[in-house]
Amino acid sequence: MPGKYSLPTQLRGVSSTCTFRAPIAPASRRFSAACHLNQTSPSPTAKAEDKNGSKEEEKDSPMGRRLAQMTEDAMLEGGRSAHRNIEQAGFSEELKNELAERIAATSFRSQYAAAHSIVEMPVFCRRTGHTRENAAAPKWTGIERVEDTTLRMLDDASKPIRMPYKIPNPVNLKLTPKPKKSRGERIAEAKERTSTYTLSQAPGFSEEEREDMRREMREQLTPGAHSMPISISGLSSLANERIEDAIARGQFKKIRRGKGVNTKTDHNASSAFIDTTEYFMNKIIQQQEIVPPWIEKQQQLGSELNRFRERLRADWRRHAAMLIASKGGSLDVQMKRAKAYAAAETRLADKAKLEASFKEDTSVSEINSDGRIVSKSETSQSPAITNDSEEVSEDLAHLPPLRDPSYLAIERSYHELAVKQINTLTRSYNLQAPASAHKPYINLDRELNACYAAVAPELAEEIKRRATERARPTSIVPPVSSSKSGSLGMAQSVKVHEEDQAKGYGMKELWRDLFTKS
């Protein structure tokens, strides 16, 4: 029954006078302040407000709704003091029972929160069983339970069915029709069939020749007319027939029999020190004249590397000879200068060897050509001493190694591109070849140092060859002067070939081709 409550309130430090209207249908009833509820006959003011209808009920102030919410929360969460306030407020039994039911429902929901979360799970999560199982499963303790292990084994035992299931296409049991032939093919086959018969009926043949042709046609239609059988049984019967014919002719009587006769013994095949599989593979490769792909790649890599090194040495030899000759002097002076550069390259190589020997362990010994045991330091120092003696004997100038930074800057792009291409080829070769046949990558600086050391001893001979070699005659034909003075001053016998007049093409032939009806 609707009514108006106007009572003072004292709840959790909130002091106010609340005026609320009880709802007509308390589906989810809001409770006012914990104060005395006057449920006697309504006052005239309440009757006047009831006459206004549901408009004033919808226009409750937000502050009133907020205070009602706070009062309800205080009653639900306040404990004994809240229950005592409810008893002192003088609520009706209906409101008390509803409030008790809500408190019991809240405590039940908090006690079984996991079960409520499973029940209230969204629809899209209920479609898959794993989400529901994960929500209902206990907390992970680090040890797999027996139930989970069994379920996992059962899931992994069989392959899941492909979804959606694809129905296999029905098998066509009808006989496939013969392929249709064109009219030209049918005419050609008919001509081929009738050509032999027409030839046999030609008037130029005698009766015996016609009979032979008919016999050949009949033999072609017999089962054994083909020269070679097609099936395995036919091949075996043909082989047996030929063997029997050879035995009947006596060809097997002269065959030498005995152990080791007509056989070649390969001792390497039964050797315990050779891998049988590798030996037979190499033998098959030699007999069949085939090579593995990585062998062909190795040949290609070797040819590319040799071509690059030869060009590098040839270019540097030509440039170094021109560089030495550009400094002037006689031929002997230039050759001595080239030998001095060669000696400088030798000193640089000996210095690098000496530094490498100091980095290595000197306790390791080697055996020289005389059979004596010497250390690596002695072997590395011996060539340096001989080179010093040679330099002193020839009395050469002490020059630094010959280098030209400008030449290297010009050729740097080509060198880097060539080295990159060779390294790419080496990488592809190493991917195909076995580990024992791998090739190392090349380095531009290392290749240049090797080029300097290899070309330096040849510079003197190169300068001498360039200075003493006769110039080769050029094969360039001088241009013919087109002026009259040039034609008069230079007598040249030129044979002019004139075209035949019958083959000429003039205006007459042009008009004929344009206006001739095709």
Image: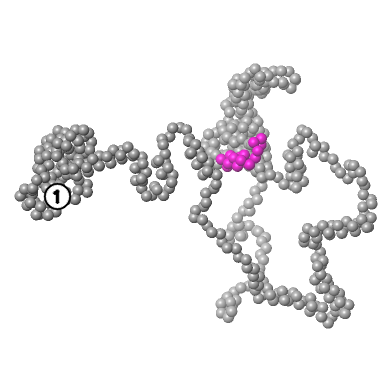
Q: Is residue 214 above or below residue 34?
A: below
Numbered disc total: 1
- Viewed as shown, does residue 130 lie left or right of 38? right
Residue at x 92% of width, y 56% of height: 247
In the image, 371 versus 516, the foreground residue is 371
The residue beneath circle 1 is 1
Res. 140 in view: yes
Report which quarter residue 286 is drawn in. Answer: top right
Percent across and percent down for residue 337 are 61, 29
Q: Is residue 286 above or below residue 194?
A: above
Q: Secondary structure at mark 1?
A: loop
Q: Main secondary structure of the magenta part?
A: helix
Residue 418, position in %: x, y? 57, 41
| Picture residue at 63% right of the left edge, 53% below the top | 477
Residue farthest toward the bottom in the current orientation of the protein: 203
Going by the picture, which residue comes out furthest to the front? 93
Amino acid of disc 1: Met
Viewer-closest of 30 and 2: 2
Residue range of the region highlighted in magenta in the rendering: 420-437
Please name the residue shown 88% across and 45% down the image. Answer: 262
- In terms of image quadrants, where is residue 188? bottom right
| Residue drawn 85% across the image and 77% down it | 210
Pick whichever, 339 or 99, lies toward us: 99
Q: Residue 123 colored magenta? A: no
Name which quarter of the figure residue 518 lies in: bottom right
